[in-house]
Image: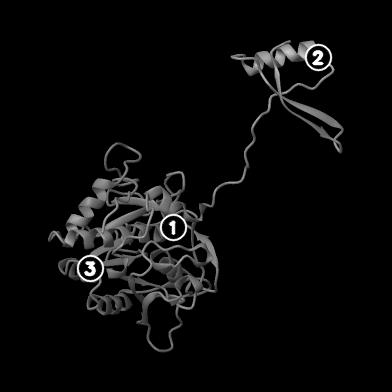
Amino acid sequence: PLGYRVRARRNHRALGFVVMNLRTPDDQPVDIALADLRARFPEVIVEANHRYRPLGTEDRRQYGQRIIGWQQIPACASQLRIGMIDTPVSASHAALKDARLHSQSVLPAGVEAADANHGTAVASLLVGNGEEGIAGLLPGAELHAVGAFRASGEKRMDTNVELLLLAFDQLLGASVSVLNLSFGGPENRLLEAAIQRFVDSGIAVIAAAGNDRRRGQVYPAAYAPVVAVTALDAERRIMKDASRGTYIDVAAPGVDVWAARAAGGGKYYSGTSFATPFVTAMVAVLHHDMAKDSGGFEASVEALTSLASDLGDEGIDPVYGAGLVQWSPRC
């Protein structure tokens, strides 16, 4: 008589409940129906059939690809050749199994190599095969990795210009189209001259912008021809300690990025080091695509910045540069 219809009636024996699921009269809001029924039947529990959602979060291990719009592996991935200078890379890691990885070291005999976590993580972000949840941006690409970092005291590592020059020399003849440098330090004329050789050869150089906002410019990122990459988190916020300056070109995911651990499995890494591979992969594809139209790496970098999503102050700023890099499907 009140206009309600019984959709279902269930006897929950263990609970001691008999529950009726009612459809309200036509066009009657739920809150009005609740007030009406509660007034008429005060001894009965009358409530809305509220909806609930799981409070877990989605798998954030691949958030980096998601926020830059990297939805699929580019068709030209197998045609790309990338160089990197870093710590050693653990080629036996499951995420790097069957990778087209060429590893070498420029450390003199008797010098202890640095821990391989950093280099392995960077390599996995570039060419990881998806094992252990580590999906690289360009699996199938050829990666030339040169180890130039040595152990330096407890849990520390470093390299010097002499070793870096050896590494640059190895890579300049490897026909790479882009070079990933996830390290930084002071300005150095020899370092600048070596990088200029790459630039003159049409090779794009991508470098980490630095993790210490109290310092001044970080090199090689601050050299004019180098693309300087800063780091964001999953909410597109700048990493707390990221370096600032007018040399910052673009931003990429670099906080709690899931990547390979040398001993196996994965872990979360933070730093501009781990934002850099996202930009390296993007420039590699842009460079390949634009080479068809006789465009140099300068055109690739220009496209990279023009596609970036502006963050912070309007336009290019010393925190985010041109903004968060965005993938535009190519090749």
Q: Earlier in the sequence, mark 1 or mark 3?
A: 3
Q: Secondary structure at mark 3?
A: helix
Quadrant of residue 14 within the rendered picture? top right
Quadrant of residue 184 within the rendered picture? bottom left
Q: Amino acid at mark 3?
A: Ile
Q: Secondary structure at mark 2?
A: loop
Q: Residues within 10 Å of mark 1 (few under 14, many from 20)?
A: many
In screen coordinates, is 37 left or right of 198?
right
Q: Of 79 and 204, which appears nearest the observer? A: 79
Q: Earlier in the sequence, mark 2 or mark 3?
A: 2
Q: Earlier in the sequence, mark 1 or mark 2?
A: 2
State the residue position of label 3.
195
Q: Are marks 1 and 2 in contact (CB under 8 Å)?
A: no
Tell me residue 125's x, y (percent). 42, 63
State the separation of the CA atoms marked 2 and 3: 81 Å
Depth check, mark 2 against mark 3: the one in front is 2
Q: Residue at x 52, y 71 (%)?
A: 155
Q: In the image, is residue 313 above or below residue 209?
A: above
State the residue position of label 2.
41
Tell me residue 79's x, y (percent). 27, 69
In screen coordinates, is 295 left or right of 95?
left
Depth check, mark 1 against mark 2: the one in front is 2
Q: Amino acid at mark 2?
A: Phe
Q: Residue at x 38, y 83 (%)?
A: 107
State the residue position of label 1.
271
Q: Of 28 and 198, which appears nearest the observer? A: 28
Q: Secondary structure at mark 1?
A: loop
The image quadrant where one finds the C terminus is: bottom left
State the separation of the CA atoms marked 1 and 2: 61 Å
Tell me residue 237's x, y (percent). 43, 44
